[in-house]
Amino acid sequence: MKAFVFSGYLLRNARLEVRLAYTAFLVLSGVGLATMAAFQLLHVGPTPAQAAAYYRGGERAGELLFGKTARQLLEVTHFHAFTMAIVYLVMAHLVIATGASERTKRAAIVAGAVGLAGDVGAPWLVRFVSPAFAWLLVAAWIAEWAAFAAFVFCPLREMWFTNGRRTLPPE
């Protein structure tokens, strides 16, 4: 972590042990993110109508769905707000320490924050305000997936597939 103090620090300069640890974190996080996407697509549904039915209740493909209670949404919100904030923070720092363009870094950081905020807040809006907010939820998922793809891809590329390793600035 001390290396992040240097503004020019890049993951390509990290020691092998550091790159192995970050790679393990990114791979395991990638599994978590893939299961999150699978849950969103297969359990909630990829369309706004399916998402609205999941949170508000209704019928979907012959299956009767009951609307989520405030307690159910509170449990999911509590878990997601804490855990995803930490994952986001670590992954954002890793993407910052890559040679990706500043535009790519900023886009991923903003899309990730906005997507996560939408993923946490939109279910409440869908359930208790209007099913029209399901469009916001689906848009938030797309922003999340794009951001987290960059959060995983850019650091892995930087650590393992970028030539021209540089030395760290003097301490």
Image (tube, grey):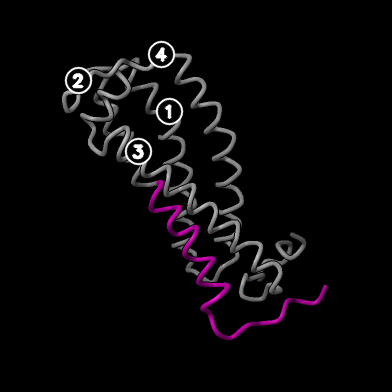
- For disc 4, the neighbor class at 10 Å (few under 14, some 14 to 19, many from 20) is few
Q: State which tag comes first along the sequence, 1 or 3.
A: 3
Q: Are marks 1 and 2 in contact (CB under 8 Å)?
A: no
Which disc is residue 40 wearing? 3
Q: Callout 4: helix, strand or loop?
A: loop
Determine which residue is flagged by label 1.
Answer: 121
Magenta region includes residue 170: yes
Image spot of residue 58 (x, y percent): 22, 17
Gap in angstroms between the C-alphas marked 4 and 1: 15 Å
Q: State which tag comes first along the sequence, 4 or 2.
A: 2
Question: Which segment did they paint magenta?
Answer: 144-171
Q: Amino acid at mark 3?
A: Gln
- For disc 2, the neighbor class at 10 Å (few under 14, some 14 to 19, many from 20) is few
Q: Amino acid at mark 4?
A: Thr
Which label sits in the foreground, 1 or 2?
Answer: 2
- Relative to 2, does residue 140 appear above or below in the rendering? above
Image spot of residue 18 (x, y percent): 69, 67
| Residue furthest left as drawn | 62
Image spot of residue 103 (x, y percent): 44, 62
